[in-house]
Image (spheres, rainbow, N blue to C red):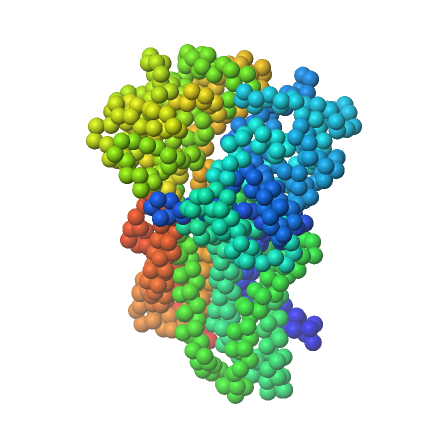
Amino acid sequence: MLKHILLLAYRNILHDRTSFFINLIGISTGLASAIFIYLWVQDELQIDRFHTYNDQLYQVMKNAQTPAGDIKTFEWTPGPLAEALKAEFPEVLQSVGVVLEESGVQGIVQVGEARFKAKEQFAGEDFFTMFSYVLKEGNSEEVLKDESSVLISYQLAEKLFPDTETCIGKTLEWEKGEAQSLHTISGVFSPPPSNATDQFDIIFNYNYYLRKNPAVNKWNYGGPSTYILLAAGTDPKKFNQKLKTYLQEKSGEEYQHLFIRRYADKYLYAHYENGIPTGGRIVYVQLFSLIALFILIVACINYTNLATARASRRMKEVGIKKTIGANRGLLVGQYLGESMLISFFALCVAISLVEFSTPWFNQLTGKELSLTLDRPTLTALLSISFITGLLAGSYPAFYLSNFQPISMLRGKLGNILGELWARKGLVVFQFIVSLVLIVAVWLIYSQMNYVQSKNLGFSKDNVIAFKKEGELKSSIQPFLRKLRSLPGVENASSMRGELTHNVTRTFGLQWEGKNEEKRTSFKYLAVDFEFIETMGIKLLAGRSFSEEFSSETQKIIFNESGIKAMGLENPIGEIVRHGGKEKQIVGIVEDFHVESLYKEISPSFLYMSPKMDPQNILVKIKAGREQATLQEISNLYAEFTAGLPFDFVFLDDSYQKLYESEQKVATLSKYFAGFALLISSLGLFGLAAYSAERRKKEIGIRKILGATVSSIIGLISREFLLLVGLAILIATPISWYLMEQWLQSFAYRIPISLGVFLLAGLGTGIFALATVSFQSIRAATANPITSLRTE
């Protein structure tokens, strides 16, 4: 029976090659899109989920209420929290405090003459028993017990000790900033896998960090991350209830409380609003999963429409089969077999397309994806293919098999289940999906262009940033003076932290007339001389920091929002208190962005710290001779750092990374929207061809009676263009609502104009008209004698 069904399916495919190729291209394109999305989604869902105790690993988080009543969520927790939770909560089997270097400033590891940069992490002794990082040498329960011990990655070990089999027990020197220390190697680990969010080269003892940073031991301090391993069967909601007031009791501060979230959720569910998780990367996972589903549905609609439209060709075949005893189940099996066969062919084509296009897709996504046809993947692909074939073939199968034999043999199909209206509705649905995707891509790109071109209040063009490393720790000012003297350098300065990702904030600023009941949050930047000039920040009043004046560490400069928040009318010369010390306001600068455009500009100030350890050096390069200037800076850097490699970034590239996810989503959406429109247009092409064929005798008679080519083209095209017009009307409010929700996440955003929908609709209409016109013109210019020859 199966052989009979497949043979009939094969003959029908040969009999109607046009429909077959339209369906093959549509379904294979849809399946290829779905496979790419499947690979991307699977990779996203596997981030941080490789740990053995994945279901029991949790991160302790902190919610803090601001004076305005908003709740801010932080990963920073007090230093003693990890040890206290393990001691006081029976549900906590293990706990670990972790400090991961995220400023981008790497320390220097030295053994003899070998010197290499390394990204450090501090971790408690339970680290390797809680997390499934691979320890190649050393005992997981012992490697982090001693404060002087250190673990290094296998790659770093090969660089430092190329001629020895083991480095356990050997000593290395660690240098970062002003700090230098000796440590004994207690273990070697494999570098974290690519699907781990935390990447590090060297691990130090957590207690060593606490001893070097005594302020972290205070309960009202936030710095380290705290991770816990809960006992199996522990209810996280009940544990959160026990944990809620714990920090308040320890610190005496009522405005903050603790809660836990699954460790593996920190990548996908990182966004919080008012203390409530509101998404993150999971939004894009859900979005692309939905896009994959809709693209497959659009491809299935093509098959359904073409199969039902061409049912008249097969009604006599069905009528004869039913007359000689074929039951409905056999007929349903035959038509589903056809759709399954096409879907299987399409899957083979789709796999070939994916294999060929994977390098391009990896370049777009920044991932290293590959289609491995192992049992789980093959099962998933065959399942998708089976479901696609089932969806595509179900309606035609049940539609055709339901006709009465007499009606079929007479050539009268009737109008079972409103077949004509159903077909038109499906065409409308296809173009609604395409239009929503097109509008979404358009607005995402427009918002990203707005983000890139908006005046940030500082100049990011031709500015490079690099880290202060090695011997620069004791010679930063001489280095900056030599930098400024280079012919291709306009100016140079330094700062603590990063300009495009500043997270420092204080509620402790004091000034005369301050309302003590109102806690105002200020962002602040510790900067060096020439910072304002180097970054092109506009000075509105007063002066900048300058080496011409003494005691500049006792001065402070505010932005416009900061002065407004304090309510000072004549601020120059006024005294404020920061960190328990008095500082005089000497300048006011125009508001500038120190965060992404998701957030509004905060009240902020600039100051010079007497013990400032600048992490970033900023250099403004003259346009036109960038390469020569970069080489001169590299030579100077090597002179001051004993030959360390010169690693730098352009500030505009660093700024673009703030929106890297959105850029990738926009690019991917662009291609998937194009695929959806292509598939929809293929279906329209097939229906137009069928319509022209069905009406060829009518067209022949009209031409004999004097109808013009243009009138016949209009006759055939009008029906389909009306459907596309209806799709535009329905898609407009849907796409407006969806994009309005997305744009609301930006504090600075573009308006949604009516022109976007008009242009998207016009473009889609023209594309549809071009698709239909090909068949319309072909039918209108055909010889009427040929059309009427059989009459």
> Where residue 270 appears, x then y in whole percent?
49, 47
Observer-nearest of 494 and 416? 494
Q: Image quadrant of residue 712?
A: bottom left
Q: Is residue 713 above or below residue 698?
A: above
Q: Is residue 18 above or below residue 505?
A: below
> Where residue 33 appears, x then y in whole percent?
53, 54
Q: Which residue is drawn at 31% across and 42% down?
A: 517
Q: Which residue is drawn at 60% across and 21% down?
A: 180
> Where residue 737 appears, x then y in whole percent?
35, 57
Q: How many marks?
A: 0
Q: Which residue is drawn at 47% across and 46% down?
A: 248
- Can you say which quadrant of the picture contains the C terminus? bottom left
Tell me: 522 left or right of 24.
Answer: left
Q: Specify whether residue 457 is in view.
A: no
Q: Which residue is drawn at 34% across and 19% down?
A: 545
> Where residue 572 appears, x then y in whole percent?
25, 24
Q: Image quadrant of residue 420?
A: bottom left
Q: Is residue 218 above or below residue 337?
A: above
Q: Is residue 471 above or below residue 763?
A: above
